Amino acid sequence: MDKTLLPTTNADGLPIIPMNEEQKYIFDLKGWITLPGLLDEEQLDTIREHQMKFLYERNSLPPEEQDNHGGPSQILLDHPAVVGVLNEILSHQGLATEDCYGFRFDHTYTSHRQAGHNNFNPHGGGGYFNFSGNSHIYQMQMGRIHAGLTRVVWELNEVRDGDGGTMFLSGSHKTAFPRPPALSERDSPLWESYSCPAGSVVIFTEALCHTGTQWTNETWDRLCLFTCYNTINAKWGKACPLKKVIESLPSKRQTLFRGVWHGMSEVPGINKYYDEANTGRFG
């Protein structure tokens, strides 16, 4: 893989943290990895406050912060460790420069769940066998993978064993057979999950079978962002931040929201930029 075109810093000038060989192997084997403790307490406090206001007091926020990734939460979009993973598993090298990411934002939502909330609904799996037009696809060749639609989950509160984090049927992104009904039951021993401190990230391919489950922690709620990234010329979800939100971001971060196309020649005939006319917003 030619990595000379990949950005080496994020929009805040922080050095990108590349995936190591162990992380690559685990992600390919299981379809997901956890990156623990990426945010400090000051960052967590401001982001939690922003997310709760976004959910329940949105009009109290300035217009440019009325989005999941507005204001202080924008640093989650291209955290150096997240970019390092996406550079490896998702980036289109020909559309990446030092000033432009080789992948794009697809959609996101904030999840706030209290004890007893249950959303067990297994879905996905077998993505290795999807057609290339399906964003939920997993491709591989010796020494290289491409994860298509990729989910980045920011856990803003601690998740302990048994609390009710996202569950995975590890390896199911490459399964050749339909999922037997017994494996769709909550008590199947094949389900795997994780524990992590607040400020951690869980990254998984949407080609993997996964589900939410019941949140059991009565001391604190689950608060997290579920953000998807995709290839430059594909989009699965319709939602996109408003123009005023995107334009409040640094220019490199704005390139996550450029239009859904590729191109065949030099700029502006190839999609290496964001401007008012080249945006992924719909409606």
Image (spheres, grey):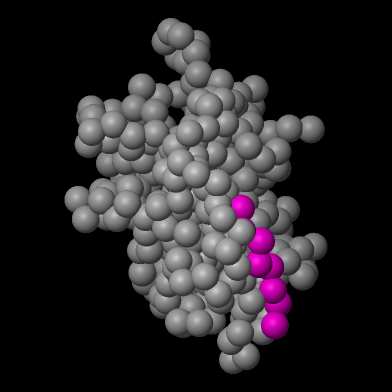
| The quarter of the displayed image where residue 259 is located | top right
Residue most toward the top?
A: 265
Residue drawn at (33%, 34%), measured in percent from left and top? Answer: 140
Q: Residue 218 location, x and y as percent?
A: 62, 90
Q: Residue 263 location, x and y as percent?
A: 49, 13
18 within the magenta span: no
Quadrant (top left/top right/bottom left/bottom right) for the N terminus: top left
Relative placement, left or right, of 201 versus 51 is left
Which sits in the foreground, 106 or 259?
Answer: 106
Which sits in the foreground, 219 or 13?
Answer: 219
Relative placement, left or right, of 88 versus 250 is left
**From this viewpoint, is residue 48 visible?**
no
Q: Residue 179 location, x and y as percent?
A: 55, 52
Q: Give the range drawn in magenta.
A: 116-123
118 within the magenta span: yes
Residue drawn at (34%, 27%), measured in percent from left and top? Answer: 93
- The vertical placement of 132 against 254, above or below, is above
